[in-house]
Each structure stands twice: as C-alpha cells, then as structure tokens.
Image (spheres, grey):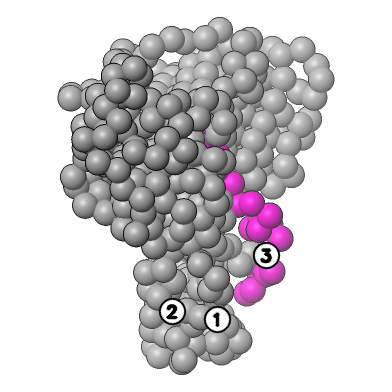
Amino acid sequence: MPKTFSAAVVLVAVAALGVAGAAPADASAVSAGALALGHQTLPLNDGWAASGAGTTGGAAATTVSVVHNRDELVAAVAGDAPKIVYVSGRIDMLAGKSCTDFADPAYTLDGFLAAYDPAVWGTAAKPTGALEEARVRSAKAQGDQIKAIVGSNTTIIGINNGRISHGSLVLTGVSNVIVRNLEIVDAADCFPAWDPTDGTTGNWNSLYDLVSLSGATNVWIDHNTFSDGNNLDEDQPLYFGRPYQVHDGASDIIKGSDLVTVSYNDYYDHDKTMLIGSTDTAGVDVGKLRVTVHHNRFGNVLQRAPRVRFGQVDVYNNLYTATDELYQYTLGAGIESAIYAENNYFKLSFDVPTGDIIHYWKGTKITAIGTLVQYGSRRAIPVDLVAAYNAAYDPDLAPDAGWTPALRTKVDPTASVPSVVAANAGIRHLGS
C-alpha cells in the first residue's frame, strides 16, 4: 500500500508553510515545497476551471499518499474523499508485463490481419466475429492493467521526477481534480481497432489517452509533460496501407466535460493531441466543453491542439512549433465550436502554409487575434489566421467566435511567449 500520513502529525510544518491540511510524518518522503504544492488550488480567474466553486482538488485532504508503483497509484487515486497523491519517481503501469500477456488465446495479429483484410472482409462494415471479439477481450485486459481511475476531490503531484509510463489517468464522471508536475508518456494500445469505414481508406484507432476526461468538471491540468516517448506512431508499420496507430489523445476532454484549465504543459512528439468533444451529434456536449488552454508548448504535435466541437474554448499565449513533415493543422474548428485564440506564437518550417494552421471540421467561426508566425530564423510577423485560411480554403470562416473570455489572470504580449513558455512549461518548474 502507499505510504499514508495522518493529519495529526507534524502540524507545525503545515503552519510554517501557511497551508491547511495534512503533513507527512516522514520529512524525507515529501519536501516542504512539495507539501505546499500539493495544497495549492487553482488561482482565481485562471481559466474556465475557476468557474463556480473553483478547482481545489485534494486541498481539504486529511491524509496524503506517496506512491512508487502501479498498484499503489491505482489504490491511492480511487474514491471521492479528498486526497493528495504524490507520484515519486518512475511508475510503469505495465509493471513488467508486455502485450503478449494481455492477448486473448483466440487472438493473434496475423490472424486478425488475414480475417479483416479489405480484400477479404471488404470496406463497408466494421469487423465483427470471433477474432474481433478476441481483440476486444485483449484490449479490456490491457485496459484493466494500465488505467488509473481517478476519483473526485483529488490532487496528483509528481515529485522526484515523477513519471507515469504506459498508462492512462482516467477521469470519468468526476469533479474537482488537479494533475500537476507529472511526465506521462506512451500509453500505447497493444490492440488497435481497424475501421474500414473511417475516412476514405479506413484507419486504425487506439483506445488510451495519457489523461482522459469524460463527463469530468472543474479540472486543472498544469505543468505536466506529455509525449509518446521513443515509441512514435510515425515509426509503426503499415497494415492495410494505413499506419498502425497505437496512440490516441494526450489529454482529451469529451462527453460533457466542462470547466477545464490546461496550463503550462509541454506536449511534444504526439499525433492526436487534444480533442475537445468527441462527436458531431448534439447531446451532452451542448453548453459544456468550456476549456481554457494557455501557456502550453506544443512541439511537433501533428494535429488537434486543440480540435473543438461545441465548446467555448479560450486558447491564448501558447507556443507552437510545427516542423515535422507529417504536420496537419493546429486549431480544429469543429461543429458549433467557438474558439477564441489570442496572442499565440507559431514557429513553422517553410513548407507549412499559414492557411493550414486552422482546419475546417464543420465549424463556422473562430476568433484568432494577436498571432505571430516565425519561419525558420526569420523575424516573426503578424498573421491573420482566419484570413489566411479563407484565402486558401472554402467555406470561409467568420472571424468572430461570438464571445470574449473573461477568466484570465494575465495575457502576455505575443513576442514574449517563446521565452515565457520555455521558462515555465512542463515538469520541474514548480519547485518540488
């Protein structure tokens, strides 16, 4: 079990830090700085997650936990009682297992490829039958191993270079959660699903996000680092002529999630980065999916930074680097979306047109102001992203999202974004 410390001990240390709540009995387990960090709450007006009662995570906790392995983490983050969980060092959610350990006896990749080859199965329907059922059972076995189901009123903090690999933090139907100072990498799906009806040529789709929000409210994701590690999708083989994609989102926000702030994170070397809203069908997402994305670094992510449906999403003071030849777009304007993008800085290779920064996904409007674009080592220049998109593509987008964000603490001048983000985004910038 994780180390748990009573609130009745070392109260002097808590008073000295000026924070309320528990202090660990073992001073070597959590430093004074990390203890203070664990009790921090989202600042007033810091994005949509400051709405309502705000986001306090586990600040009211009477105990804290320090976890060092998969089983400790899963146990510590469960349940809705207030709690602060410190992830110390590296945790591998596979815990020594590999993909073969999760494979159902009736499943083999070679068998699956033979059965559902479009030349055999066709392209009109998704796979069904015994092999597909075996794949689903295999995926469930992996999911049971690598998911950490996070309860409400939780703060998760990385200490001692806290890192979670090959796993997913899952926030489903919960509220009031803070995730900070963690490196989370490579939640690779061992058993991607084949969908011949996805797009014109079919696609492989994976199941696990590094952090997944589904019906979650008042969530603060701050100062984390997200990537695929050394297991890039672009290095995977082609099956049925399509990349065998083993990763899904880095931090997806879907199914009626609401009031989320994503700040000072470092996203790099990932494809489908941040999906806000998972379907074009009006339903639980309408009136929700209100998200603020500020002061993050998106380094050679290929798309979805973010892609938005329905939500009012405030995207400001982010640094985008797009030099990978596989780059697709940054801001995805989806159905009934209202993106307000202000003072973002783009560093592009010369083969990336400014008209490709925005992508049309049935959206009709987007505000994009204060943008600077730098090509190579040239001087950054102001660019009207909506005008650049409209000049290159149809249908035209209206340059007004129809709303103006109010929940902000500070908007930096665009020219200062590279230095501000470089000095603050990602892990190891919070003094823990």
Q: In the image, is 425 to the left or to the right of 366? A: right
Residue 124 is tagged as none
Amino acid bearing label 2: Ser
Residue 100 is tagged as 1
Q: Nearer the viewer, residue 182 or 14?
A: 14
Whichever of labels 2 and 3 marks the residue nearer the N terminus, that label is 2
229 within the magenta span: yes
- List the residue tagged with mark 3: 236
Indicate the position of residue 395 as horizontal and vertical percent values: 48, 33
Q: Secondary structure at mark 2?
A: helix
Amino acid bearing label 3: Gln
The residue depicted at 77 percent of the width and 12 percent of the height is 379
Q: Residues within 10 Å of mark 3 (few under 14, many from 20)?
A: few
Whichever of labels 3 and 1 marks the residue nearer the N terminus, that label is 1
Residue furthest toward the top?
413
Q: Which residues are magenta?
A: 223-242
Does residue 146 show up?
A: yes
- Viewer-nearest of discs 2 and 3: 2
Amino acid bearing label 1: Thr
